[in-house]
Image: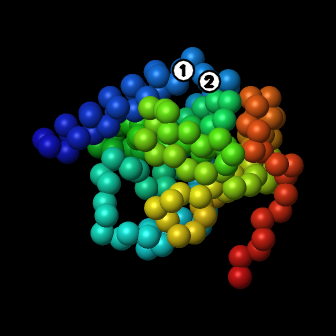
Amino acid sequence: MLYILYLRSMVKNSDQIIRSISEEVKAEFRDTKIRFKNFDFYKKKERFNFDLNKSLYTYYRADIYLLENKIVVVGKSKILGKTIRLLPFAICNSEKISTETAIKYLTRHIKTELIDCSLEIEFEDAKYSNNIRIVIPRIGDKVYEKLKLSGFEALPKPQAFPNNP
């Protein structure tokens, strides 16, 4: 019962945040397939500092909202047979990271790479010691074009990430 109340609270908070940013949204991509690279729970800087509201980077579907200086990712997870929205996080322009937002979890944009139709966005989460990448397959080229049009100023020209050893 307590778990169900927790889930309802999380969905309600997520809905409130989405409503609060709805006027700023330049483009949105709903129910998009995504995956994360370089995410390692054990690379967390403070291992025993848990935040139950912060979702781990382990989901495979998300709604992506493009704002002027942010990319907002709202993860989706199937829990108890129902798809629910998790609390969003924002990938902020590295020049203009702002805490004046309803989104509690902010990360810093590092670089972007467009490979065929897949877009890889590398970002820094202050709670982890390594950078994390979000991969948007198939529609990455469309997302990249919308990012350019939405004024995401920290978006460099597509470049290659260094190879992992």
Residue at 83 percent of width and 62 percent of height: 160
The kind of residue on which mark 2 rests is: Val
Residue nearer the viewer, 15 or 32: 15
* Disc 2: which residue: 25
Residues packed near mark 1 inside 10 Å, few (<14), some (14 to 19) or many (20 plus) = few
Seen in the picture, residue 84 relative to 121 is either above or below; the reply is above
Residue at 54 percent of width and 65 percent of height: 39
Looking at the rendered image, the quarter that the N terminus falls into is top left
User: In which quadrant of the rendered view does residue 93 lie?
Assistant: top right
Residue nearer the viewer, 35 or 45: 45
Q: Is residue 38 left or right of residue 78?
A: right
* Whether label 2 touches label 1, CB < 8 Å: yes
* Disc 1: which residue: 22
The kind of residue on which mark 1 rests is: Ser
Taking the view exactly as shown, the residue that stands out farthest to the top is 23
Visible in this render: residue 78?
Answer: yes
Seen in the picture, residue 94 relative to 40 is either above or below; the reply is above
Instruction: Please state the horizontal and vertical placement of residue 134, each as a whole percent of the image.
Output: 63, 53
Determine the secondary structure under disc 2.
Answer: loop
Q: Is residue 134 left or right of residue 11?
A: right
Query: What is the tally of numbered marks visible in this picture?
Result: 2
Res. 86 mark: none
